[in-house]
Image: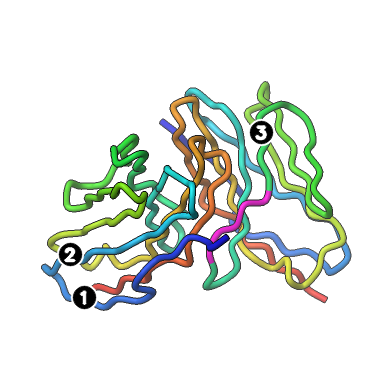
Amino acid sequence: KAGVTQTPRYLIKTRGQQVTLSCSPISGHRSVSWYQQTPGQGLQFLFEYFSETQRNKGNFPGRFSGRQFSNSRSEMNVSTLELGDSALYLCASSLAQKNIQYFGAGTRLSVL
Amino acid sequence: GQSLEQPSEVTAVEGAIVQINCTYQTSGFYGLSWYQQHDGGAPTFLSYNALDGLEETGRFSSFLSRSDSYGYLLLQELQMKDSASYFCAGLTGANNLFFGTGTRLTVIP
């Protein structure tokens, strides 16, 4: 069974641009969660999608948004990029409950 | 609010036992998970405790005490490959998962 796939793996953008990250969950998993990881901050929860609906949302500004498609693939978008958005963005999929999550390798975003 | 506190760094000798503690303040707490992350890698699931007590999976064990809002991960027979960051994560009844800031474990020969 294929794992969670995130694309692209690396991305370099400049301030003010926008970016779209993609995540393909494990087959059969309907829950997809997104996290931002920065040194010293651990994993900060962005949002979760389940069956194409946003089920939970973390404390991030509206510049961060996401969506989920009918095949459970998910995208997250960050608009008007800021230097502080430089981070590793991780996607995780799970069955309905999130006690066990399976993570992708992440997308490392650098904002210059 | 939600908070999970872990030591930032732990060093232990190869072959020894190490315990990584996690104290939490999580409203609507449902269970505690543990994840391992090697440098440059993705977090991988290690264990989950929904009930008080010890869960054992090979060299790794995890413990939960709801009355003390406390849990720990126990790693036995440490190997060099166990050098990694370890995160505890609290699951709430609303199906939200909150991560601690992680403990960096360094195993030395």
Identity, as a three-letter code, of the amino acid under mark 2: Leu
* Secondary structure beneath label 2: loop
Tell me which label, 2 or 1, sits earlier in the chain.
1
Q: Chain of mark 1?
A: A
Instruction: Tell me the subunit letter for badge 3.
Output: B
Residue B45 magenta-drawn?
Answer: yes
Pinpoint the chain carrying mark 2. A
The spot of residue A29 in percent (x, y) is: 47, 46
Which class describes the residues within 10 Å of circle 2: few (<14), some (14-19), or many (20+)?
A: many
Q: Are the numbered discs 3 and 2 placed on the same chain, yes or no?
A: no
Query: x, y percentage for residue A1?
Result: 57, 60
Instruction: Give yes or no for contact between labels 2 and 1 (Cβ–Cβ under 8 Å).
Output: yes
The disc label shown at residue A106, or none: none
Quadrant holding the C terminus of chain B = bottom right
Query: Please, is residue A33 above or below residue B11 in the view?
Result: above
Does the magenta portion include B53?
no
Q: Which residue is mark 3?
A: B70
Stretch in magenta? B42-46
Q: Which residue is mark 2?
A: A81
Is B28 located above or below residue A103 in the figure? Answer: above
> Looking at this view, is B74 or A19 the one in front?
A19
